[in-house]
Image (cartoon, helix red, strand yellow):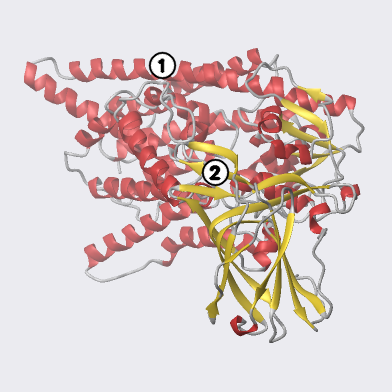
Amino acid sequence: MTPTTDPEARPPLLPIALLCLAVSATYVLSMLFSTEGHFIPQVADLYLIAQYARGFAEGHPFQYNPGEAPTTGATSLLHTIFLAFAHFIGFRGEGLIAFAILSGAVFGFLTALEVFAAARQIGQSRNVALLGASLVILNGPLAWSFHYGADIALALFLSTWLFRAWLEGAAPEKPRPNAFVLPACLLAATRPEALVLVAVLVALATWEARRESGRWKLRLNWCLPVLVGFVIPVGMRLMTGSAANTSFSQKLLSSNWGALTAAVFSIDYWSDLIRGVLLGFYPATQRLGLGGGNAPYFAAPLLLVFVFIALLRPMAQTRRLFGFLVAASITIVCVTPTINLGVHSNRYVLFVLPCLLLLFARGLDETGSALDRAFSAPTGAAFRRLSLMAVAFGVLSAIRFALIYADSASSVYRRDEALFDFIRTRLPESATFINNATAIEFRTGRRSINISGVVTPGFSEVLPAETEASAFEVLSRSSPSALPPYLIAPDAYVNGSPAWAALVGGSAIFQTSSLESTELAIYPTRRELIGRQRTWMRLVAPPGFAQVDALNVADPIDERDHAYRWASSAGTRSLFAALKIDKYPGDQGAAEVEVADGGRVIFGFEEMEVRTPKAADVLVGIRTHPEPSARVRHADGDRRLDIGLPQPAIRFSTSRGRTDWMRVSLQPGWNEVALRLPAGLLEGAITRLRIEGRYAAYSYVFFQPGAATAPERQ
């Protein structure tokens, strides 16, 4: 490493600071102009993080609201604590949002300094180092991220610091092999996926030490980042019941779309990243993964080609450069197959972009030198011209994303903030809500049951693809009279699915007028259907029989307690749970009874553990329907579909054998049928039951002769 007494090693603080200030002023002023002078986040999730930060500052960490059970909705532990400190010293309400945004701008400045230092670390000239830092500052997606207000700004700074410190471990003069430990520990405390990155780097450092000394030698301090990465999820598991400190516990693409579609999305995404972002072959309108596009604004064209050129010339840190890129690639592969694929300007892969932009600057220098020699041009002429082109692309990128930034802030201001204002000024302070739209607590002081995500206890196990059905089932665990009187939801959700009629009790009492494609609305809550599905309307235990167990399908808590698993697909199309609203036919002139119930169409199997305390036949009751609803998902898209199953076919099996196929004819509306599981197939006090066939299952109840009613599972 060049000694710090060398003036050439010192970063040009003034030019970097002025450029950062110009970019930050552009972003902040564009936001203030579009929001009537208010600091507004790009995504309402920042309000959720701020609510958790306030909880930390007020002495109830991980509790989204005081008195609630701890939950894991704040993904970044270190960033949440950082904002909690800001709240503690006086940044409150909109002031905390302003602090989050402006501190992100500071992290952008610090990241640029780290890029400059990393460039000097690998022997680049001052001009190349300054170009690398400038490209990071002028990169639109990075500038958007630094002013986003969430944890991505801190993660970008720490990952770039880690990159520079990692290179420092192989410096030709005065190497510092332990320099990467501190930033790696902090990064592991900031993002859960950083565990993969730091674990690979620790493995590479250990391998390098073995090559140099000829024997294996593991330094314990190198293991600290990995230990931090493990301790946090273990602690989260002990405190909240979930190790996944993220906004969704079950966010794998395979869980929410099916294995084939997950593979299609992942492969397409990697192709998009390489062709669209790293090579620059995609137009701005081409989507990247499940998020927006804007591929041309991530870097100047042919980024990957110039990175390749930069790595051709050997240097002392070449092996470490390749090692960091390999570790980053493995990390990105691990985070690719999630429902966040490509969202928020691909924020989950941006941590490697400062490194790539630095290598891009080095590649321009190498290419410029080769062109100077080939055309007998003055030394540095080609590099200066290539640099001007790269900076021009950067300016366009920064301005384009500043416009996106202003537009996103305006959308949140005119939708979310308008909703908050109505709640604060027009509804009583005691008002509570069922919420499937935005984070209201931080800005209104009101409470809500958030039915998507994991901020509300009890909803952490809801599969995002099955929110419609599973959220209704979890809500039904409470008394209808205890549920909030208001429902907040996007109007497109309510209008797009008939199942919302189970929760919507009338016309909206308020709807935003942002002129966005989707507006936020407040509806009166419909309560009379909630919990009604937990009562069997027709099926009763035969004389001498008693209930021994029951399973409410699509209730994630009940399914967890029964070790429930399922697989349902039609070819390459996967079927997920949906909510069905229909009536039981009236019996002998009795009025029809309307019931809403979440369940699954099964083209495959279900498995569950069932109490079978007696060595006797089990009567299995099933609530089903001849036209069940299903959420059908495929790489082509997602749709809600009613499927005709007037004569389902079902077969029971256990480790002891299986039954013949059983078929029943169903009547219109809800049906409750009873099928026999022979005693010879039971495995003991607990039987692992597999149900196969083509049918719809909404609820199960199990009876045995002479058995006492089983207590509820805890």
Residue 29 drawn at (x, y percent):
60, 15
The kind of residue on which mark 2 rests is: Val
User: In which quadrant will I find the C terminus?
Assistant: bottom right
Give the residue at mark 1.
Answer: 395
Q: Is residue 416 above or below residue 591?
A: above
User: Looking at the image, which residue is at 80% across and 36% down?
Assistant: 504
Q: Is residue 62 above or below residue 241?
A: above
Cα gap from disc 1 to disc 2, whole angstroms: 44 Å
Name the secondary structure under disc 1. helix
Residue 634 drawn at (x, y percent):
47, 42
| Side of 136 where 566 appears, left or right | right
The answer to whether any part of residue 456 appears in the image is no
- Label number found at residue 562: none
Give the residue at mark 2.
Answer: 632
User: Looking at the image, which residue is at 57% across and 30% down?
Assistant: 148
Asked whether 421 or 565 is in front, the reply is 565
| Side of 370 where 591 appears, left or right | right
Residue 104 drawn at (x, y percent):
56, 32
| Side of 396 where 455 appears, left or right | right
- Rate crowding at label 2 as few (under 14), some (14 to 19) or many (20 or more) other CA atoms within 10 Å: many
